[in-house]
Image (spheres, grey):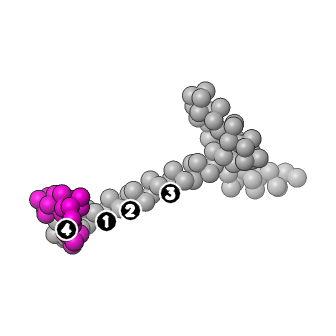
Amino acid sequence: MQMKNDTVQATTKVLTAHVPLPMADKVDQMAVRLERSRGWIIKQALSAWLAQEEERDRLTLEALNDVESGQVIDHQTVQTWADSLGTDHPLPMPR
């Protein structure tokens, strides 16, 4: 039995966070509605947030690489395109 507990401890880590009561209540309500544990709800939310932040980092690095390599569109070109979108003859998206 001790071996199993060691394995669980090696693959997980307990994190503690103070959250506002309304947020905690929403987590509890969601857990009841989905018939899941509070921990499951929080793990899902944290996983989604981490994935979102990783994607944001990836896109930022990609954009910085585009700037460094000169692959940019000037502001006036983008503004002209955006202004055309509400007209009868929208311009093609700048590339």
* Residue depicted at x 72% and y 43%: 33
Disc 4 crowd rating (10 Å Cα; few below 14, some 14-19, many 20+) is few
Tell me, for residue 62, which label it has, or none. Answer: 1
Q: For the residues carrying marks 4 and 2, which lies nearer the camera in this image?
A: 4
Image spot of residue 45 (x, y percent): 58, 48
User: Which residue is labeled 2 in the image?
Assistant: 58
Front-most of residues 36 and 85 = 85
At x 57%, y 48%, the residue is 46
Residue 24 location (% of width, % of height): 63, 33
Separation of residues labelled 3 and 4 (CA atoms): 39 Å
Q: Are marks 3 and 1 in contact (CB under 8 Å)?
A: no
Residue type highlighted by circle 2: Arg
Magenta span covers which residues? Answer: 75-95
Left or right: residue 4 compared with residue 45: right
Mark 3 or 1, nearer chain start: 3
Work out whether residue 90 or residue 58 is closer to the camera in this orientation and state it: 90
Whole-angstrom CA distance, mark 3 to mark 1, is 16 Å
Q: Quadrant for residue 89, please give it.
A: bottom left
Q: Indicate which disc, 3 or 4, sits on the residue closer to the N terminus.
A: 3
- Distance from disc 4 to disc 2, alpha carbons, whole Å, reads 35 Å
Between the residue at mark 1 and the residue at mark 4, the CA separation in whole angstroms equals 32 Å
